[in-house]
Amino acid sequence: MAKWILVECFSGPPGKVIAFGAAPKSFVPLSNILRNPLSLADAEAALAQACRTRALVARVSDDGRRTVRAEPLLITPERAHAVRLWIGPVSEPLPAPEPVGAWYFNLTTNRSVRSVDLLDLYGVAPEEREAELAIAGAFTRLVTNRDESEALAKIVNSAPGTEHQAVWTVRRDDEALRAGHFACRIILEVDAAGRREVLFRGVTQDIGAATAVPAAPPPMILEYRLLEASTAPGEYRAIVNLRSLQLIRWIGPPMPGIAWADLPGQPPPQIHPDDMAAAQEMSRELARHRTEGTVRLRRTDGGWQPVRVRAALMALDQHTTAGLATVTAVE
């Protein structure tokens, strides 16, 4: 039986295969999957059309023997992130595809944008379906694997052309644990106004129950268990980009009342302007030693919350560091 083939088009035109059915593929050529020259030619033509028009392509091959179907995965009507492809005998029924959704991180603005398909995959309730939020919000339902430091280093470095693939556990909003296959690439793009932005474009595919996929991590990896066990009541831990002073992700629950998620109706995340110099000095001092200080963070009600920050340097890889911040409210 033929399987659905997931082909990325993060850089514009159709690129490499990132999944064959529920099996992740490491950016391999389509010719590695489709060996028949006629099937390959049909598939490439359908992929190019689906990526160009951002519309469904469904046709029968010229010889009448094969059905070809190409479904673009969109966030906005202007851009496809990937194409879900099926090609098989005309007599073979179309199988149900694995759920998959598109997303991107705008690394320039610190925003995460999600497709409706991705919100369906996460089981997000209709009243909570904000398409955009801070990048840190994208990690709240993800149980990351041993490659997390590598992934965070790529976010910090934001180098165009960088790719990443992983299987992480997705905790759906109904508490079901699913194995999520992620594939993504960092792209430098110019928007309609001529602004240069760095985007991390990707897709997430549900490849089965987390307990049935050996590559999926357990609900909490040991390092986070140790960190949470050592966190005192009233303390909150976060990983911070030392270049931008932006939150990358919380470790454990987020600090309540702080505007960090960048949701509609809330103020944007912000350090008080009068405290930025002190925060930047703390960031510089981390190169030599642990540091501590008090800054004010924007609250969800628009006010300012003084917090005591204890920070340590955190190595993400051999060349990239972040800040591990322990934050406590100052009354």
Image: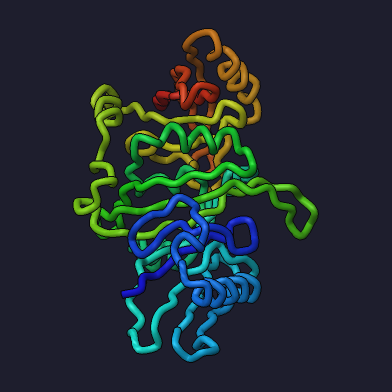
* In-front residue for pair 21/128: 21
Q: Quadrant of the N terminus?
A: bottom left
Q: Residue at x 50, y 88 (%)?
A: 60
119 vs 94: above or below? above
Residue projecting furthest to the top: 288
* In-front residue for pair 159/251: 159
Q: Name the side, left or right, on which 21 lies relative to 102.
A: left
* In-front residue for pair 111/260: 111
Observer able to see residue 263: no
Residue 49 locus on image (x, y percent): 62, 76
* In-front residue for pair 116/155: 155
286 vs 50: above or below? above
Q: Residue at x 50, y 8 (%)?
A: 289
Q: Quadrant of residue 19?
A: bottom left
Observer able to see residue 217: yes
Residue 59 locus on image (x, y percent): 51, 86
Q: Residue at x 42, y 26 (%)?
A: 327
Residue projecting furthest to the left: 211
Residue projecting furthest to the bottom: 64
